[in-house]
Amino acid sequence: MNSLDETPRANRLHIALFGITNAGKSSLINALTRQEIALVSAVKGTTTDPVYKAMELLPLGPVVIIDTAGFDDQSELGELRKKKTLEVLNKTDLAILVLDAMTGITEFDREILALIKSKRIPILGVLNKVDLQKEPNVKNGLLSQELGIDLIPVSAQAGLGIQELKEALIRLVPEKEEQRPLVKDLLTPGDLVVLVTPIDESAPKGRLILPQQQTLRDILDSNAIAVVTKEDGLKETLQKLRNKPRLVVTDSQVFQKVAADTPPDIPLTSFSILFARKKGELRALVKGARAVEKLQNGDKILISEACTHHRQSDDIGTVKIPRWLRQKTGKKLIFEQSSGFSFPKKLQDYALVVHCAGCMLNRKAMLYRISQAEEAGVPIINYGVLIAYLHGILERSIEPFEGF
Protein backbone atom coordinates (compact mmCIF):
# COMPACT_ATOMS: atom_id res chain seq x y z
CA MET A 1 0.00 0.00 0.00
CA ASN A 2 1.28 3.47 -0.86
CA SER A 3 2.01 5.76 2.06
CA LEU A 4 -0.11 8.89 2.40
CA ASP A 5 2.77 11.24 1.59
CA GLU A 6 3.52 9.69 -1.79
CA THR A 7 2.88 11.54 -5.04
CA PRO A 8 -0.34 10.08 -6.56
CA ARG A 9 0.45 7.73 -9.44
CA ALA A 10 -1.57 9.81 -11.89
CA ASN A 11 0.73 12.78 -11.24
CA ARG A 12 3.96 10.88 -11.95
CA LEU A 13 6.02 10.67 -15.14
CA HIS A 14 5.08 7.36 -16.82
CA ILE A 15 8.13 5.54 -18.28
CA ALA A 16 7.35 2.32 -20.17
CA LEU A 17 9.77 -0.33 -21.44
CA PHE A 18 9.00 -2.18 -24.67
CA GLY A 19 10.79 -4.91 -26.61
CA ILE A 20 10.86 -8.60 -27.42
CA THR A 21 10.82 -11.38 -24.84
CA ASN A 22 14.11 -11.84 -23.00
CA ALA A 23 15.59 -8.58 -24.29
CA GLY A 24 16.21 -7.75 -20.63
CA LYS A 25 13.45 -5.25 -19.82
CA SER A 26 12.89 -6.55 -16.29
CA SER A 27 16.64 -6.77 -15.61
CA LEU A 28 17.02 -3.18 -16.82
CA ILE A 29 14.33 -1.98 -14.40
CA ASN A 30 16.16 -3.67 -11.53
CA ALA A 31 19.45 -2.10 -12.62
CA LEU A 32 17.92 1.38 -12.97
CA THR A 33 16.30 1.28 -9.55
CA ARG A 34 18.96 -0.80 -7.79
CA GLN A 35 16.11 -2.93 -6.44
CA GLU A 36 14.76 -6.39 -7.20
CA ILE A 37 11.46 -4.96 -8.42
CA ALA A 38 10.81 -6.98 -11.58
CA LEU A 39 10.82 -10.77 -11.77
CA VAL A 40 13.75 -11.95 -13.89
CA SER A 41 13.97 -15.40 -15.49
CA ALA A 42 15.58 -17.06 -18.49
CA VAL A 43 12.16 -18.52 -19.28
CA LYS A 44 10.52 -16.61 -22.13
CA GLY A 45 7.31 -14.76 -21.31
CA THR A 46 7.97 -14.31 -17.58
CA THR A 47 6.36 -10.86 -17.73
CA THR A 48 2.76 -11.39 -18.82
CA ASP A 49 0.53 -8.40 -18.05
CA PRO A 50 2.02 -4.89 -17.79
CA VAL A 51 3.48 -4.29 -14.32
CA TYR A 52 3.24 -0.77 -12.84
CA LYS A 53 5.61 0.36 -10.11
CA ALA A 54 5.50 3.84 -8.57
CA MET A 55 8.92 4.89 -7.25
CA GLU A 56 11.47 7.64 -6.88
CA LEU A 57 14.01 7.41 -9.70
CA LEU A 58 16.74 9.89 -8.88
CA PRO A 59 17.36 12.43 -10.22
CA LEU A 60 14.09 12.30 -12.21
CA GLY A 61 11.92 12.23 -9.10
CA PRO A 62 8.54 10.46 -8.76
CA VAL A 63 7.86 8.16 -11.72
CA VAL A 64 5.83 5.13 -12.69
CA ILE A 65 7.92 2.42 -14.37
CA ILE A 66 5.88 0.10 -16.60
CA ASP A 67 7.29 -3.32 -17.54
CA THR A 68 5.48 -4.80 -20.55
CA ALA A 69 5.22 -8.29 -21.97
CA GLY A 70 7.46 -9.21 -24.91
CA PHE A 71 5.98 -7.89 -28.12
CA ASP A 72 6.89 -11.14 -29.91
CA ASP A 73 5.05 -13.32 -27.40
CA GLN A 74 3.58 -16.08 -29.58
CA SER A 75 2.08 -18.14 -26.78
CA GLU A 76 -1.59 -19.00 -26.61
CA LEU A 77 -2.21 -15.75 -24.72
CA GLY A 78 0.26 -13.76 -26.84
CA GLU A 79 -2.30 -11.67 -28.73
CA LEU A 80 -4.05 -10.68 -25.53
CA ARG A 81 -0.73 -9.71 -23.94
CA LYS A 82 0.20 -7.73 -27.05
CA LYS A 83 -3.10 -5.86 -26.80
CA LYS A 84 -2.36 -4.99 -23.16
CA THR A 85 1.10 -3.76 -24.16
CA LEU A 86 -0.40 -1.51 -26.84
CA GLU A 87 -2.83 -0.03 -24.29
CA VAL A 88 0.19 1.08 -22.23
CA LEU A 89 1.23 3.39 -25.09
CA ASN A 90 -1.81 5.55 -24.43
CA LYS A 91 -0.54 6.57 -21.01
CA THR A 92 3.22 6.59 -21.71
CA ASP A 93 5.08 9.90 -21.27
CA LEU A 94 8.47 8.45 -22.17
CA ALA A 95 9.25 5.14 -23.95
CA ILE A 96 12.33 2.94 -23.75
CA LEU A 97 12.81 0.41 -26.54
CA VAL A 98 15.03 -2.39 -25.23
CA LEU A 99 16.94 -4.27 -27.94
CA ASP A 100 18.93 -7.46 -27.47
CA ALA A 101 22.49 -6.79 -28.68
CA MET A 102 22.91 -10.44 -29.58
CA THR A 103 19.63 -10.73 -31.49
CA GLY A 104 19.74 -7.32 -33.16
CA ILE A 105 16.71 -5.51 -34.50
CA THR A 106 13.67 -7.69 -35.18
CA GLU A 107 10.46 -7.10 -37.10
CA PHE A 108 8.67 -6.86 -33.75
CA ASP A 109 11.06 -4.11 -32.59
CA ARG A 110 10.39 -2.19 -35.80
CA GLU A 111 6.65 -2.57 -35.34
CA ILE A 112 6.57 -1.21 -31.79
CA LEU A 113 9.04 1.54 -32.71
CA ALA A 114 6.76 2.69 -35.53
CA LEU A 115 3.78 2.76 -33.17
CA ILE A 116 5.68 4.79 -30.56
CA LYS A 117 6.79 7.28 -33.20
CA SER A 118 3.26 7.54 -34.62
CA LYS A 119 2.04 8.64 -31.19
CA ARG A 120 4.91 11.14 -30.92
CA ILE A 121 6.08 9.73 -27.62
CA PRO A 122 9.67 10.69 -26.72
CA ILE A 123 11.73 7.52 -27.12
CA LEU A 124 15.15 6.24 -26.16
CA GLY A 125 16.73 3.05 -27.47
CA VAL A 126 18.68 0.76 -25.17
CA LEU A 127 20.98 -1.92 -26.54
CA ASN A 128 21.24 -4.48 -23.76
CA LYS A 129 23.81 -7.28 -23.26
CA VAL A 130 26.64 -5.33 -24.94
CA ASP A 131 29.09 -7.12 -22.66
CA LEU A 132 28.52 -10.16 -24.88
CA GLN A 133 29.21 -8.27 -28.15
CA LYS A 134 32.44 -8.24 -30.14
CA GLU A 135 33.52 -4.90 -31.67
CA PRO A 136 30.19 -3.19 -30.86
CA ASN A 137 30.94 0.49 -31.50
CA VAL A 138 30.61 0.74 -35.31
CA LYS A 139 27.71 -1.70 -35.50
CA ASN A 140 25.75 0.10 -32.77
CA GLY A 141 26.30 3.51 -34.35
CA LEU A 142 24.91 2.28 -37.67
CA LEU A 143 21.91 0.72 -35.92
CA SER A 144 21.14 4.02 -34.18
CA GLN A 145 21.17 5.82 -37.55
CA GLU A 146 18.98 3.17 -39.13
CA LEU A 147 16.34 3.41 -36.39
CA GLY A 148 16.50 7.18 -36.08
CA ILE A 149 16.77 7.15 -32.29
CA ASP A 150 19.53 7.51 -29.71
CA LEU A 151 20.83 4.12 -28.66
CA ILE A 152 22.49 3.67 -25.26
CA PRO A 153 24.68 0.53 -24.91
CA VAL A 154 24.21 -1.15 -21.53
CA SER A 155 24.54 -4.42 -19.72
CA ALA A 156 21.78 -4.68 -17.14
CA GLN A 157 23.36 -7.83 -15.79
CA ALA A 158 26.84 -6.32 -15.35
CA GLY A 159 25.61 -2.82 -14.47
CA LEU A 160 27.37 -1.21 -17.44
CA GLY A 161 26.03 2.03 -18.97
CA ILE A 162 23.27 2.50 -16.37
CA GLN A 163 24.44 5.98 -15.33
CA GLU A 164 24.68 7.02 -19.00
CA LEU A 165 21.12 5.71 -19.48
CA LYS A 166 19.82 7.81 -16.57
CA GLU A 167 21.50 10.93 -17.97
CA ALA A 168 19.95 10.25 -21.40
CA LEU A 169 16.52 9.83 -19.78
CA ILE A 170 16.86 13.20 -18.05
CA ARG A 171 17.63 14.88 -21.37
CA LEU A 172 14.64 13.20 -23.00
CA VAL A 173 12.04 13.95 -20.35
CA PRO A 174 9.36 16.09 -22.01
CA GLU A 175 9.59 19.66 -20.86
CA LYS A 176 6.93 19.94 -18.24
CA GLU A 177 4.02 21.89 -19.50
CA GLU A 178 3.22 24.31 -16.78
CA GLN A 179 1.64 22.10 -14.15
CA ARG A 180 -2.07 22.48 -14.68
CA PRO A 181 -3.56 23.69 -11.41
CA LEU A 182 -6.86 22.67 -9.91
CA VAL A 183 -7.75 26.00 -8.27
CA LYS A 184 -4.42 27.78 -7.76
CA ASP A 185 -4.84 30.07 -10.78
CA LEU A 186 -8.22 31.24 -9.46
CA LEU A 187 -6.89 32.32 -6.07
CA THR A 188 -4.73 34.94 -4.42
CA PRO A 189 -3.08 34.56 -0.98
CA GLY A 190 -5.62 34.89 1.82
CA ASP A 191 -8.63 33.94 -0.33
CA LEU A 192 -11.20 31.71 1.33
CA VAL A 193 -12.46 28.51 -0.34
CA VAL A 194 -15.27 26.33 1.03
CA LEU A 195 -15.06 22.62 0.17
CA VAL A 196 -18.29 20.62 0.43
CA THR A 197 -17.48 16.97 1.05
CA PRO A 198 -20.33 14.55 1.74
CA ILE A 199 -19.55 11.74 4.15
CA ASP A 200 -21.79 8.84 3.16
CA GLU A 201 -21.49 5.09 2.56
CA SER A 202 -19.32 5.64 -0.52
CA ALA A 203 -16.79 7.86 1.31
CA PRO A 204 -13.56 6.02 2.23
CA LYS A 205 -13.24 5.34 5.94
CA GLY A 206 -10.97 7.76 7.79
CA ARG A 207 -9.92 9.88 4.82
CA LEU A 208 -11.05 12.10 1.95
CA ILE A 209 -11.22 10.92 -1.65
CA LEU A 210 -8.32 11.82 -3.95
CA PRO A 211 -9.93 14.81 -5.76
CA GLN A 212 -10.76 16.40 -2.40
CA GLN A 213 -7.26 15.79 -1.05
CA GLN A 214 -5.56 17.25 -4.13
CA THR A 215 -7.83 20.30 -4.26
CA LEU A 216 -7.17 20.99 -0.59
CA ARG A 217 -3.42 20.77 -1.20
CA ASP A 218 -3.66 23.13 -4.20
CA ILE A 219 -5.48 25.68 -2.05
CA LEU A 220 -2.84 25.48 0.68
CA ASP A 221 -0.06 25.80 -1.92
CA SER A 222 -1.74 29.06 -2.98
CA ASN A 223 -1.50 30.40 0.58
CA ALA A 224 -5.28 30.54 0.56
CA ILE A 225 -7.59 29.32 3.32
CA ALA A 226 -9.76 26.20 3.09
CA VAL A 227 -12.90 25.52 5.10
CA VAL A 228 -14.34 21.99 4.82
CA THR A 229 -17.96 21.12 5.56
CA LYS A 230 -20.60 18.54 4.74
CA GLU A 231 -23.50 19.52 2.51
CA ASP A 232 -25.97 19.81 5.39
CA GLY A 233 -23.66 22.26 7.16
CA LEU A 234 -22.99 24.61 4.22
CA LYS A 235 -25.63 27.23 5.06
CA GLU A 236 -24.43 27.54 8.64
CA THR A 237 -20.80 27.62 7.52
CA LEU A 238 -21.42 30.50 5.10
CA GLN A 239 -23.31 32.43 7.78
CA LYS A 240 -20.42 32.08 10.24
CA LEU A 241 -17.77 33.33 7.82
CA ARG A 242 -16.80 36.97 8.30
CA ASN A 243 -15.74 37.34 4.64
CA LYS A 244 -17.42 36.04 1.50
CA PRO A 245 -15.62 32.99 0.05
CA ARG A 246 -13.79 33.35 -3.25
CA LEU A 247 -15.15 29.96 -4.33
CA VAL A 248 -17.29 27.03 -3.22
CA VAL A 249 -16.26 23.59 -4.53
CA THR A 250 -18.64 20.68 -4.08
CA ASP A 251 -18.87 16.97 -4.70
CA SER A 252 -21.00 16.53 -7.82
CA GLN A 253 -23.50 14.23 -6.12
CA VAL A 254 -24.84 17.09 -3.98
CA PHE A 255 -24.49 19.77 -6.66
CA GLN A 256 -28.18 20.71 -6.68
CA LYS A 257 -28.47 21.19 -2.90
CA VAL A 258 -25.18 23.09 -2.70
CA ALA A 259 -26.22 25.38 -5.58
CA ALA A 260 -29.47 26.17 -3.76
CA ASP A 261 -27.61 26.95 -0.51
CA THR A 262 -24.83 29.04 -2.10
CA PRO A 263 -25.79 32.70 -2.79
CA PRO A 264 -25.63 33.64 -6.50
CA ASP A 265 -22.80 36.12 -5.94
CA ILE A 266 -20.46 33.36 -4.70
CA PRO A 267 -18.73 31.39 -7.51
CA LEU A 268 -19.51 27.68 -7.45
CA THR A 269 -18.01 24.61 -9.17
CA SER A 270 -17.29 20.93 -8.46
CA PHE A 271 -14.25 18.74 -7.86
CA SER A 272 -15.09 16.80 -11.03
CA ILE A 273 -15.19 19.95 -13.16
CA LEU A 274 -11.85 21.06 -11.72
CA PHE A 275 -10.38 17.72 -12.77
CA ALA A 276 -11.98 17.99 -16.20
CA ARG A 277 -9.97 21.17 -16.66
CA LYS A 278 -6.74 19.77 -15.20
CA LYS A 279 -6.69 16.31 -16.81
CA GLY A 280 -8.61 16.77 -20.03
CA GLU A 281 -10.19 19.51 -22.09
CA LEU A 282 -13.07 21.18 -20.28
CA ARG A 283 -14.38 22.80 -23.45
CA ALA A 284 -14.72 19.40 -25.20
CA LEU A 285 -16.52 17.92 -22.19
CA VAL A 286 -18.91 20.88 -21.92
CA LYS A 287 -19.65 20.46 -25.62
CA GLY A 288 -20.75 16.90 -24.85
CA ALA A 289 -23.67 18.24 -22.79
CA ARG A 290 -25.51 19.18 -25.99
CA ALA A 291 -25.76 15.50 -26.92
CA VAL A 292 -28.09 14.79 -24.00
CA GLU A 293 -30.91 16.68 -25.73
CA LYS A 294 -30.55 14.45 -28.83
CA LEU A 295 -30.74 11.06 -27.10
CA GLN A 296 -33.34 8.67 -28.50
CA ASN A 297 -35.03 5.48 -27.34
CA GLY A 298 -32.63 2.55 -27.54
CA ASP A 299 -29.45 4.69 -27.54
CA LYS A 300 -26.49 3.08 -25.79
CA ILE A 301 -24.51 5.15 -23.27
CA LEU A 302 -21.10 4.16 -21.94
CA ILE A 303 -20.38 4.98 -18.29
CA SER A 304 -16.59 4.78 -17.93
CA GLU A 305 -14.64 4.94 -14.69
CA ALA A 306 -10.85 4.91 -14.45
CA CYS A 307 -10.78 3.11 -11.11
CA THR A 308 -12.46 0.07 -9.64
CA HIS A 309 -14.27 0.48 -6.35
CA HIS A 310 -16.86 -1.20 -4.17
CA ARG A 311 -20.24 -0.10 -5.52
CA GLN A 312 -22.90 1.03 -3.06
CA SER A 313 -26.65 0.55 -3.47
CA ASP A 314 -27.02 4.11 -4.83
CA ASP A 315 -23.76 4.16 -6.82
CA ILE A 316 -23.12 7.29 -8.90
CA GLY A 317 -22.11 5.51 -12.12
CA THR A 318 -24.46 2.54 -12.18
CA VAL A 319 -27.53 3.97 -10.44
CA LYS A 320 -27.72 7.75 -10.07
CA ILE A 321 -26.50 8.93 -13.49
CA PRO A 322 -28.68 6.41 -15.42
CA ARG A 323 -31.67 7.45 -13.30
CA TRP A 324 -31.06 11.18 -13.81
CA LEU A 325 -30.57 10.76 -17.58
CA ARG A 326 -33.78 8.76 -17.96
CA GLN A 327 -35.67 11.37 -15.93
CA LYS A 328 -34.21 14.25 -17.96
CA THR A 329 -34.78 12.74 -21.41
CA GLY A 330 -37.84 10.58 -20.81
CA LYS A 331 -36.20 8.00 -23.10
CA LYS A 332 -35.54 4.29 -22.74
CA LEU A 333 -31.75 4.28 -22.70
CA ILE A 334 -29.28 1.39 -22.51
CA PHE A 335 -26.29 1.76 -20.18
CA GLU A 336 -23.02 -0.13 -20.30
CA GLN A 337 -20.06 0.23 -17.91
CA SER A 338 -16.28 0.04 -18.22
CA SER A 339 -13.81 0.47 -15.37
CA GLY A 340 -10.08 0.44 -14.72
CA PHE A 341 -7.40 1.05 -17.31
CA SER A 342 -9.28 -0.59 -20.20
CA PHE A 343 -11.32 1.59 -22.54
CA PRO A 344 -13.61 0.15 -25.25
CA LYS A 345 -12.35 0.35 -28.84
CA LYS A 346 -15.72 0.44 -30.67
CA LEU A 347 -17.03 3.70 -29.29
CA GLN A 348 -19.13 4.34 -32.40
CA ASP A 349 -21.70 1.94 -30.92
CA TYR A 350 -22.54 4.57 -28.30
CA ALA A 351 -24.55 7.78 -28.48
CA LEU A 352 -22.68 9.28 -25.50
CA VAL A 353 -19.67 8.54 -23.29
CA VAL A 354 -19.94 9.65 -19.67
CA HIS A 355 -16.55 9.56 -17.94
CA CYS A 356 -15.56 9.94 -14.30
CA ALA A 357 -13.29 12.77 -13.12
CA GLY A 358 -10.21 10.76 -14.16
CA CYS A 359 -8.25 11.39 -10.97
CA MET A 360 -6.55 7.98 -11.36
CA LEU A 361 -5.39 8.74 -14.94
CA ASN A 362 -2.49 10.88 -16.04
CA ARG A 363 -3.32 13.71 -18.43
CA LYS A 364 -2.02 11.79 -21.44
CA ALA A 365 -4.37 8.88 -20.78
CA MET A 366 -7.39 11.16 -20.28
CA LEU A 367 -6.65 13.12 -23.45
CA TYR A 368 -6.35 9.83 -25.33
CA ARG A 369 -9.81 8.79 -24.22
CA ILE A 370 -11.27 12.14 -25.26
CA SER A 371 -9.54 11.88 -28.66
CA GLN A 372 -10.85 8.33 -29.17
CA ALA A 373 -14.40 9.54 -28.60
CA GLU A 374 -13.91 12.50 -30.94
CA GLU A 375 -12.45 10.28 -33.68
CA ALA A 376 -15.46 7.98 -33.38
CA GLY A 377 -17.78 10.98 -33.61
CA VAL A 378 -19.20 10.26 -30.16
CA PRO A 379 -19.78 13.10 -27.66
CA ILE A 380 -17.99 12.70 -24.32
CA ILE A 381 -18.80 14.38 -21.02
CA ASN A 382 -17.61 13.87 -17.45
CA TYR A 383 -19.60 13.30 -14.27
CA GLY A 384 -19.37 16.84 -12.92
CA VAL A 385 -20.26 18.55 -16.20
CA LEU A 386 -23.17 16.16 -16.82
CA ILE A 387 -24.60 16.49 -13.33
CA ALA A 388 -24.37 20.27 -13.46
CA TYR A 389 -26.15 20.23 -16.84
CA LEU A 390 -28.89 17.86 -15.66
CA HIS A 391 -29.62 20.10 -12.67
CA GLY A 392 -29.61 23.32 -14.69
CA ILE A 393 -26.45 24.78 -13.15
CA LEU A 394 -23.83 24.12 -15.83
CA GLU A 395 -23.44 27.77 -16.80
CA ARG A 396 -22.94 28.78 -13.19
CA SER A 397 -20.43 25.96 -12.54
CA ILE A 398 -18.09 26.98 -15.38
CA GLU A 399 -18.31 30.75 -14.80
CA PRO A 400 -15.18 30.79 -12.60
CA PHE A 401 -13.01 29.76 -15.56
CA GLU A 402 -11.70 32.12 -18.19
CA GLY A 403 -13.16 31.69 -21.66
CA PHE A 404 -16.62 30.50 -20.61
Image (cartoon, rainbow, N blue to C red):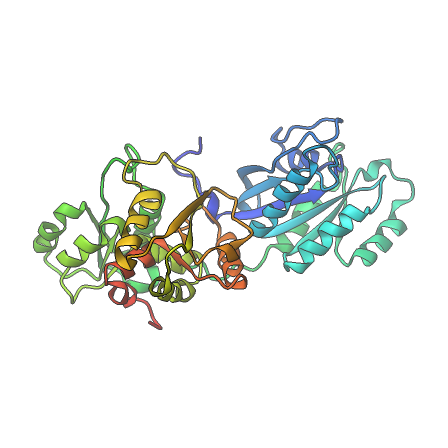
| Residue drawn 45% across the image and 42% down it | 339
Q: Position of residue 177 (x, y in %)?
A: 50, 61
The reply to whether residue 222 is in sight is: no
Q: Nearer the viewer, residue 46 or 17?
A: 46
Tell whether 187 sits left or right of 242: right
Where residue 403 appears, as percent x and y from the top left, is 35, 73
Residue depicted at 33% across the width and 42% down the height: 209
Rendering coords of residue 389 (x, y %):
29, 61
- Which quarter of the rendered picture does the N terminus lie within? top left
Residue found farthest to the bottom? 403
Residue 385 in view in this figure: yes
Left or right of 18, for residue 243? left
Which residue extends farthest right?
135
Residue at x 67% of width, y 59% of height? 118
- In the rendered image, residue 193, in percent from the top left (x then y), is placed at 23, 56
Residue in the foreground of this view, choosing between 118 and 8: 118
Q: Quadrant of residue 52?
A: top right
